Image: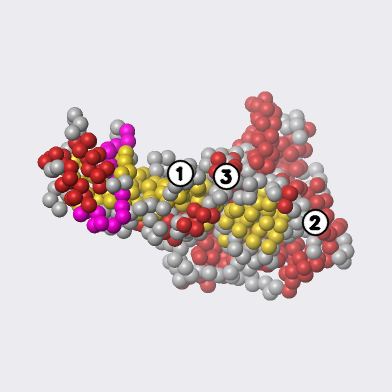
Amino acid sequence: MPGFQALQRDHDVSLPLAPCWRVPREHVLAVTTEALVSELSALAGGDSHYWVLQQGPLAPGSKRQSLLNLDSDTALAAALNQTFRRDNGPESLIFQCMPPQKAAGVLFTRHPMRPDLDHIVIEGCLAGSDAQQRVILHADGQLAWRSEGSEVFLDEVSLLAFHELTQALHDSYGEARAAEWIWDGQRLWMVQALPIGTLPMPSEVWTRRAGLGFSPQAISPLWYTMLGRWLKEGFWRSLGRRVGWQELSNIEPYRRQHSYLYGNGRFFKALQSWQKSAFLWWALPPAWRASRPQGPQEQSKNNRSEPLSRAMTAVKLGWLRLKVRGVAEVTEAPSADDLWLELIRLDRLGEKLAGLEGHLGYVIAPAVASRGSKPTLHSLGQRTVEMLAVLPAVSRREISWDQFVRRFGGQSAGADPSFPRLREGGHDAQLLKDIVESLSEARLSALARFSTIKRSRFDWLSLRGQAADLRYDIASRLRRVLQQMSQRLVALRLIKHPDDIYFLYFDELWQAWQGQAQARRQLETLLGERKVRYLSDSHAGPPDWIIDSVGYGTSPLGQRASHDTVNGYGLVEGEACGRVLRVGSGWQLNQVQPGAILVLDQSDAGWLPWLASAAGLVLAHRDPLDPAAILACALGIPTVWGVDDAMHCLADGAQVSLNGSSGDLVQIMDAEM
């Protein structure tokens, strides 16, 4: 129509944009109001509609338009005339023709305040209602959370339409966007889309999820400087030299923050690029996820040499196993030099093991899992499986507790030497005894079947389990050496308590061992602060569980709900009901009560005997290689996984019901029990 220019806006090919026009100032001023109303009516085509007039930037320099909703052709004509007749009025204006709305709001393609969460956040309300609703979807469009009272909202608006809009925004812009939308009862329409200013593309990211089982819980300073250095030198630096990662040669792959091990996301981004796959997409921040796994057919470029590589890996692990077993136990009265040499021998073996275990954990295991191979119990480690298989005999008093402890005395809640071993007794060990005696016959029967499972020694995941066993062996021997070293340091008054040795960094241990005066003056205060921080962090969890601005449980919408429903994905069928306990570290296992609903972000194989008593499990991830996921499938523990923000949205002590089929978690008021 003369005077009106239909607009084809950038990125609008796949986006659900309503018809849009630009009208110049001279055209509006040149025609009568009646003629302008007639032209607008012809543009609308006679269907029911309203108009959205763009009045210019909401603020100077802003990309967001100030929008005016007008319910008739006459109202739009009047608004155009009024705006153009103003002093310093614009030369042109843009307006859209929108169908009648039944709901309206805004959609964020990523969480606007939590860049670590791969969530779609929708806020809006039904026409004629002031009740604001919030709905959160997983990245695949499945419901993750909804505010109380949103049932009518969800009955009206299609979640599929929101997911399709999110995909269209991703395809069109490639970055996080906030889109204003309306729903006309059949279709979702986009009014405008803007960048989410709080979510810039990160240049540096540290993530715990990329740990892939090496250190899923709080890590002591000494173990951090040993394990972190082993993986850096034994795996990352070796791989980098081979494939030419010059830009990563002087960058640290790990750091310890709030007592937890974080991996540098740049290493995992480079690893994913080198593999030419999306095996590690979940370990990267959402902004760095270029693609998603395509399914079992996706292959690593290194697969052709797998049979030979498996044989070589098995031989190398066998050689390391002999070397570790060949390390002589220190004598009752060793010299200072003997103790230090023993420590260095174990340190060197740990670095050699890290080269193999890094390859198995970071390269092989994600590829195997992505191809659809089901993890077996033996991917947990043979020692762990044997320990679980013996629990029924302990419960039935066929094996005494003392015999059990002698056989598995080196096991603990983690490889970190700071954890007491089972042979040392303690509250954890006593609680485990009580848990074993409380296991149901169904669980005991399932555990007893573990002893009949045929062991596969040479598949990739079993080799990974063997490497994990060997890491535990090295750490257990390290603990014995460190216990003797700590006695000397206490006698020399360099540390106050034998356990203080685990809170020294490796270079500080060397300085203390040499009796340097500087270490003696400074260590007492430092160690006290570190111990308090470590134990506090072990129970509170890492920062990404603590810092929360908008998450489910702390938002006003979340707090208003008395019967919050959180949705994940069903892993193991069945229903369970119980009290929530969030477990973030082995130090919290002494709080586990039989019949609890245990909530985990990640788990360690050393936790599994305690986890066997759970009524149900809630896992924040969807990693099939996580020990808790493997145990849940083997024992039939009702389990929901993929509840990304589980450590936020579920509170300790809350009574919840869990449905392992639908993936629902519903909080129950005590009065309803």
Q: Hey, what amino acid is under mark 2? A: Ile
**Residue at screen point 32% across, 41% down:** 67
Compute the Cα span from label 3 to label 1.
16 Å
**Residue at screen point 53% across, 51% down:** 150
Whether the magenta-drawn stretch holds residue 141 is answered as: no
Instruction: Identify the mark at residue 558; answer none if there is no mark.
Output: 3
Q: Hey, what amino acid is under mark 1? A: Pro
Compute the Cα span from label 2 to label 1.
43 Å
* Residue 627 horizontal side relative to residue 399, left or right: left
Residue 669: x %, y % from top left:
70, 49
Comes first in the chain, label 3 or label 1: 1
Q: Which residue range is magenta in the image?
A: 42-59
Q: Nearer the viewer, mark 3 or mark 1?
A: 3
Instruction: Identify the mark at residue 112; answer none if there is no mark.
Output: 1
**Residue at screen point 31% across, 41% down:** 68
Q: Is residue 317 above or below residue 195?
A: below
Q: Is residue 164 above or below residue 197?
A: below
Crowd around label 3: few <14 · some 14–19 · many ≥20 (10 Å) = many
Q: Nearer the viewer, mark 3 or mark 2?
A: 3
* Residue 451 horizontal side relative to residue 641, left or right: right
Q: How is the image coloured?
A: secondary structure
Residue ID for mark 2:
435
Q: Nearer the viewer, mark 2 or mark 1?
A: 1
Q: Hey, what amino acid is under mark 3? A: Gly
